[in-house]
Image (tube, rainbow, N blue to C red):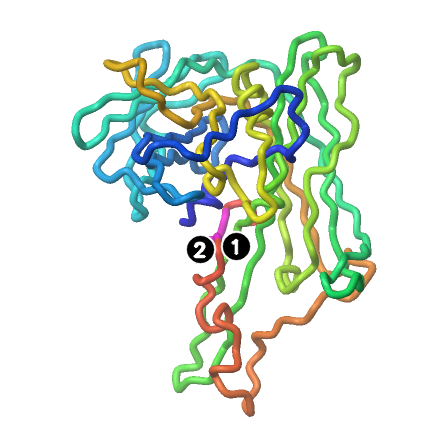
Amino acid sequence: MNRRLAFILLLLVFGTCREPIDLDVDRVRGQLVVYGHVDNGDDALYVQVSRTNELPYQYLPEVGATVTLMDNQGNTGVYRRTQEDGIFLYDRSSMRIIPGRTYRLRVRTANGTVYESDPEQIPLNRAIPQATVEFKQVLVNTGSAGSVTTINVMDIYATTVLASPSSDYFIRWRSFQTFRFNPTDFPDPFSSVPPPCYINREIQPQRIPVFSTAGFQGDQIPRRLMGRIEIDYAFNNKNVITVKAFSQTREAYDFYRKAGIVLNNTGSIFDIPAAAIPGNFHNVEDPEEEVLGYFDASLVEIQRIEVTRLDFPYRVPETDCMYESSRPVEQYPQRCLNCTTIEGSSYSRPYFY
């Protein structure tokens, strides 16, 4: 699974931070970088362990590390290595993630050095998203002599209900698009049909909507834009739009808010220079060592809505993978020949699709 889609940590738009952030892009090579997240939901949970490289915007996977989750009741949970170096998948059967409990992450590198995160307590305050979509046509600059063109888009919004409006909330949202993709069905002697792929994409991963109820009055957060999708081949089949609302700690909220330094051509925090944004990891034996990254534990509420071709007020592009007898194989897009080349693809059908 692509690490960007596994558990992308989104960025705030540059300039939204009230406090200046030191972008120290000349860091020494080899600093440990750890990003991880746990919640009480059912979706997969990942941890990425890597090190800074001398090249900007690049990290090197940490090979040979082990990752363990611990709670304040003395229980431990297991992370298993994946096929991608430096990416670890949590085994939910090893320890349940329970709201109200406190969790911390431990990383042991191949040379035996131990790193731990500060404890993160999962809040008990539920933030319940209610998602809607709107279809629009917008003008975009083509970049050539100021000319513009019209594109069809779908905007995703969420109104969020606060189950305990008298409590303090620190909320982060993420939204996803899931659809089925059918590769080209070429004739063969056995009339076999290639299996479809199921694609899971994070919607506009350069955005990170966050909210604090400090100074806020009310029992629901008014409608906020979660993201925008340009209409393309993905909408030839049913799309499931997922909006997740994470109730998290003040410290996690501050981290994500301060991580609001985004480059126009980046999609996740893994793509930006290792910035001097205080994280919550430390070397157990050497607290002076600077460790980058963050581990957060959140209470998650999820809403999913379905969108089909019939919902659109305009024409959805036809698939370019339909078999044509006069069309040479090399003229088909690569995704039509092998749908696993699409980022975020899998042959496994999600339980909610």
Characterize the magenta stretch by its predominant secondary structure: loop
**Percent x, y for residue 159?**
75, 30
**Percent x, y for residue 153?**
74, 54
Residue contact between numbered discs 1 and 2, judged by CB atoms under 8 Å: yes
Up/down of 176 relative to 221, above or below: below
**Percent x, y for residue 12?**
62, 33
Q: Which residue is mark 1?
A: 199
Residue 346, numbered label:
2
Q: Which badge, 1 or 2, is on the more N-terminal residue?
A: 1
Up/down of 38 relative to 176, above or below: above
Up/down of 186 relative to 203, above or below: below
For the point 47% across and 23% down, which residue is it?
296
For the point 56% across and 24% down, which residue is it?
21
Q: Is residue 302 visible?
A: no
**Nearer to me, 272 or 130:** 272
Q: Is residue 233 visible?
A: yes
**Nearer to me, 323 or 66:** 66
**Percent x, y for residue 16?**
68, 28
In the image, farthest residue toward the left: 111
